[in-house]
Image (cartoon, rainbow, N blue to C red):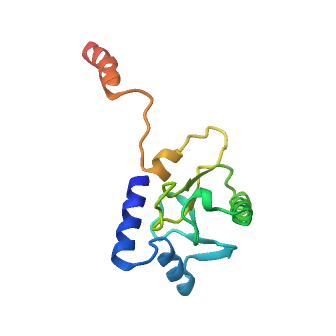
Amino acid sequence: MMRLQYQAGERYWSEHGGSFWEAPIETEERRRERFVGRIGASSWITAFAPLGFNEVRVVVSDRETFLDLTADDAEALALGVSRVLSWYEASGYNSFNLAFFSGPLSGAHYFRPNLIMVTRSALVPNYRSDAMHLERLHWEAAVDRPPEALAAELRDHFLEA
């Protein structure tokens, strides 16, 4: 996911001379279809093509990495996350995933720190997890054992049946 974000940001910067991250924010703010609001330098939108349930995205304008965030930026992000979590709770959700992406620590003029939040299935009796953060927010499937180990274990059982 990080590689894709870096490459898309660099490519957009070289082709358009602007920020890949700020262009959709400007469009969403103008159209008002998915624009939620702005707190300080952070802009809050819902996703055009969601990765998960109730997805909210945040872009911090005019910053490149985590290291560039000011105390005001951190406070604005905390306030926004708190407001989204309040809505999640009011809507009956009690579990969520959050990922916060930063540009590389040097030479990241094309990147903007961005955050993604999604709800998960509500924790209720007989709860079953729907998907975890690695799958939804980082596009990385996670497994509990290598496929070769699974095949070895399954093969023995499979051949006995």
In the visual, does 87 lie left or right of 159? Answer: right
Residue farthest left in this picture: 159
In front: 117, or 150?
Answer: 117
Image location (x, y in percent) of residue 128 = 56, 40
Image location (x, y in percent) of residue 14 = 35, 73
Using the image, determine if residue 21 lies above or below residue 121: below
The quadrant in which residue 81 appears is: bottom right
Using the image, determine if residue 9 lies above or below residue 99: below
Image location (x, y in percent) of residue 46 = 56, 70
In front: 145, or 21?
Answer: 21
Residue farthest front in this picture: 106
Q: Residue at (74%, 66%) from the top-left corner?
A: 72
Image quarter in which the C terminus is found: top left
In front: 34, or 37?
Answer: 37
Residue farthest bottom in this picture: 30
Q: Residue at (58%, 77%) from the top-left corner?
A: 35
In the visual, does 49 lie left or right of 73? Answer: left
Image location (x, y in percent) of residue 137 = 49, 52
